[in-house]
Image (cartoon, rainbow, N blue to C red):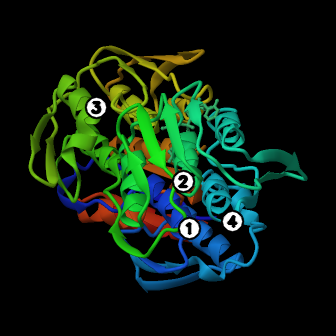
Amino acid sequence: MEQYIIKGGIPLNGEVEIGGAKNAALAILAAANMTDETVRIENLPDVRDINALLEAMQDIGARVERLDRHTVTVNGSCVENCIVENENMKKIRASYYLLGALLGKYKRAEVPLPGGCNIGSRPIDQHLKGFKAMGATTRIEHGFIIAEAEELHGAHIFLDMVSVGATINIMMAASMAEGNTIIENAAKEPHVVDVANFLNSMGARIKGAGTDVIRITGVSALHKTEYSIIPDQIEAGTFMFATAVTGGNVVLQNVIPKHLEATTAKLLEMGCQICEYDDAVRVMAPKKLQATHVKTMPYPGFPTDMQPQIAVSLALAEGTSIVTESIFENRFRYVDELSRMGASVKVEGNVAVISGVEKFTGARVNAPDLRAGAALVIAGLAAEGITIVDDIYYIERGYENLDEKLRKLGAQIEKVASEKEIQKFRLKVG
Ligand SMILES: CC(=O)N[C@H]1[C@@H](OP(=O)(O)OP(=O)(O)OC[C@H]2O[C@@H](n3ccc(=O)[nH]c3=O)[C@H](O)[C@@H]2O)O[C@H](CO)[C@@H](O)[C@@H]1O
Ligand SMILES: C=C(OP(=O)(O)O)C(=O)O
C-alpha cells in the first residue's frame, strides 16, 4: 500500500500543467465504442479510472492503442459482446457510460452496478428511466444491469434531479435512437458539453448541451473523429486551493478560466488575487485566508467535487465558515481525519460549521475517497510537521502524478510504500 508523506509549511510557487478532465474522458471513451471507425482521443489523463475503463473496453473486444501517455485510438468495430465482466467496473462510477453507449449502438448492454466514491447512495434510476422511455427494458440480475431494446426511439425525458451521469448516458443512447429526444432539467457541466461536442464530431446531432434542455436527433451510424478532451476543472481547482492554503503564487496552465468561475469567486471572497489569461490562471494567496460560506450546486454552481478542498482551506481561514453539501449525503467523511490535524469542524446533516484555526499539525490520516484524499494532501501541505496520507489509491483514481506536480511547485511530498521509505523521508527533510 502506498502513501504520500508530506512535510508541510512551504508556499507553492511556479507553474503547473493541468491535465484532461477525468469525468469527460470516461464518457468520451465509452462513446468512442459507438462507431466502427477509428477514433483518436487526445489529452486523456493517465489515471486509474481511465486505465480501468480502457482495459474493460479491450475485454469486450474494442481495439485500443496507446499512441503516447495521453493519446489513444479506439476502434469499436470488433466489440463482440455487450457483456462487461471486468471486475474493476464494479469499482468505478463511469462504467455506467458503457450502458448508454452499447445500448445506443447494439441495443443491448450488460454492465455491473457501478461503484465510485462512497459519498452517498448514488442511485441510477434516472438513467434507467431515460432508457425505458426510449423503449428499452432494464433489469438487475446477479449484480449486473441489463438493458435491451428491439429498437430505441426518441422520447421526451424530464430528469427528476440534475444528474450529470443520466444526462450523458441518455444523450449517448439517444444519439443512435430513431427520432428525436428531448432531455429536460439536463446537467450543464462542462463535461456534458464536451461529450456532446465529441459525439457531434462523430456525426451525432445534439443541440443545447450546456443549457437545461438538450435536443437530440438520432442518426443510424457515427463516424471517425479526432478529439482533444477539455482541461480538468477539478484538478485545476485542487491546485488553486493548495496554492491558497500554503500562501503561494501559482500559474495554472491549460485551463478554461470560464469553467473555474465558481472556484475563482470563492477564492476572491477568501482574499486571494486571481489573474485570468486565455488558457491560464494565476492564484496569489493573501497572508491569511478569510472565512466564507459555500453551498455545492450543479454547474455553474460550486462543484461538489471541490467541497473537501475548499473546506480544508476554510479550516485555516480567519472566522467561521458554513459549508453546505447539497448533492451527496455522505461527503464529509474526511472531517474526522482533518480533526486529527487540529481542524475545528462540526458537521450536522449536510452542513459543516468550520471555525478557522491558526494552524494544522501533521498527522497520519486516511484518504476516504478521491477528493477528500486530495483535500487531506492540501491539509498536509499547509500543516506544521509531517503528514502521512494512507490509501492514496483513491487519489490516484483521478489525479495524475499529484506528488510530482506538487514537488515542481516546491512542495516536500513523496510517494512511499514502506516504513523504511517513511524513515528515509523523515531523515531527508529533517
Ligand atoms: C464519473 C463522474 O462523472 N462522476 C461525477 C458525476 O457523478 P454522478 O453522475 O454519479 O452524479 P449525478 O450528477 O448523477 O448525481 C447528482 C445527484 O443526483 C442523484 N441521482 C443521480 C442519478 C440518478 O439516477 N438518481 C439520483 O438520485 C445522486 O444521488 C446525486 O445526489 O457527477 C457528480 C456531480 O457533479 C460528481 O460529483 C462526480 O464526480
Ligand atoms: C466523485 C467522483 O468520482 P466518481 O463519480 O467516479 O466516484 C469525483 O470525481 O470526484
What crowding class fits label 2: few (fewer than 14 Cα within 10 Å), some (14-19), or many (20 or more)? many
- State the residue in front, 424 or 308: 308
Residue topped by disc 1: 34
Between marks 3 and 1 in the image, the one whose residue lies nearer the viewer = 1
Q: Quadrant of the N terminus?
A: bottom right
What amino acid type should be assigned to the residue bearing mark 2? Met
**Ligand 1 under 8 Å from disc 1 Cβ:** no
What crowding class fits label 3: few (fewer than 14 Cα within 10 Å), some (14-19), or many (20 or more)? some
Mark 2 or mark 1, earlier in chain:
1
Mark 2 or mark 4, earlier in chain:
4
Mark 3 or mark 2, earlier in chain:
2
**Can see residue 413?**
no
Residue topped by disc 4: 106
Q: CA distance from mark 2 to mark 1?
A: 9 Å
What crowding class fits label 1: few (fewer than 14 Cα within 10 Å), some (14-19), or many (20 or more)? many
- State the residue in front, 226 or 401: 226
Identify the residue at image location x=67%, y=51%.
Answer: 152
